[in-house]
Image (cartoon, rainbow, N blue to C red):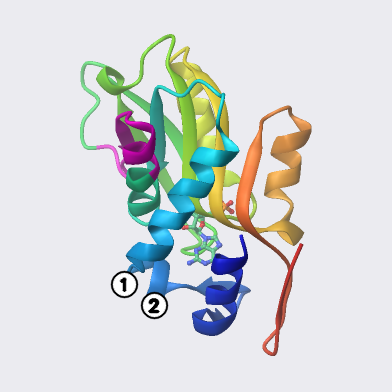
Amino acid sequence: MKELEDKIKKDGEILPGEVLKVGKFLNQQIDTELLKHMAEEVERLFKGTKITKVLTIEASGIPFATAIAMKLSVPMVFAKKSITSNVSGEIYTAKVYSYTHKNTNHISVSKAYLNEGDEVLICDDFLANGKALEGLISIVEEAKAHVAGAVVEIEKVYQNGGNSLREKGYRIESLAGITRMTDEDIEFN
Ligand code: 5GP
């Protein structure tokens, strides 16, 4: 998506460890016009695909997932990055290694919010090694719901998480795919 690629080039900052900071327009301050256009693009990409719920992970996936869910007129559910209580086994959980924070979170979703028969579109801001999406996919499948597909704002294609999920048969879309990132330049596919 050209508008997103141009914004990344203009306002993205490359941090050590190949982390792209997008706080100026996606993650902390949010460019709402761009967000609206991204949701329209996702609606176009998934036209004809049945989706009953949008699922993401807190915190940075929430604006994107909400904008998409509003476009599709379906509920948005987000996984929490902690387990508050599971005394009566009322939550689905998965372990997710965080690329940016270099730690492991036990993410959780209340069983009340994902049901057998749901057609779930998984969303996130970034796709790098694929651990966040893998955790969300495992929760959807534990709920006996179906993964209709996944979409991320930015895929770091060279980190291969997306391609290994595609090889497993999942439909993975990204609005901007970075093939190379150096201090001087960012290349897209
Ligand atoms: P993965 O699990 O695919 O390795 O990484 C995706 C998760 O890590 C996303 O939820 C995102 O929050 C974070 N992440 C990965 N790479 C980047 C990056 O370059 N910049 C930012 N801001 N977050 C990233």
The quadrant the C terminus occupies is: bottom right
**Left or right, residue 41 beside residue 165:** left
165 in magenta: no
Specify few, some or many for label 1: CA neighbours under 10 Å numbering under 14, 14-19, or 20 or more. few
Can residue 87 be seen in the rendering of this structure?
yes
Image: magenta residue range: 68-83
Can residue 132 be seen in the rendering of this structure?
no
Residue 29's disc is 1
- Indicate the position of residue 132 as horizontal and vertical percent values: 52, 45
- Please state which of residues 98 and 71 is positioned toward the viewer in this rendering: 71
The quadrant the N terminus occupies is: bottom right
| Mark positioned earlier in the residue sequence (2 or 1) | 2
Say what secondary structure mark 2 lies in. helix
Say what secondary structure mark 1 lies in. loop
Q: Quadrant of residue 25?
A: bottom left
- Indicate the position of residue 97 as horizontal and vertical percent values: 52, 49
Whether 9 is drawn above or below 76: the answer is below
The kind of residue on which mark 2 rests is Lys
Whether 171 is drawn above or below 118: the answer is below
The span from disc 2 to disc 1 (Cα, nearest Å) is 5 Å
Circles 2 and 1 in contact, beta carbons < 8 Å: yes
- Please state which of residues 149 and 133 is positioned toward the viewer in this rendering: 149
**Left or right, residue 91 beside residue 147:** left
Q: What residue is drawn where x is 45% and y is 33%?
A: 94
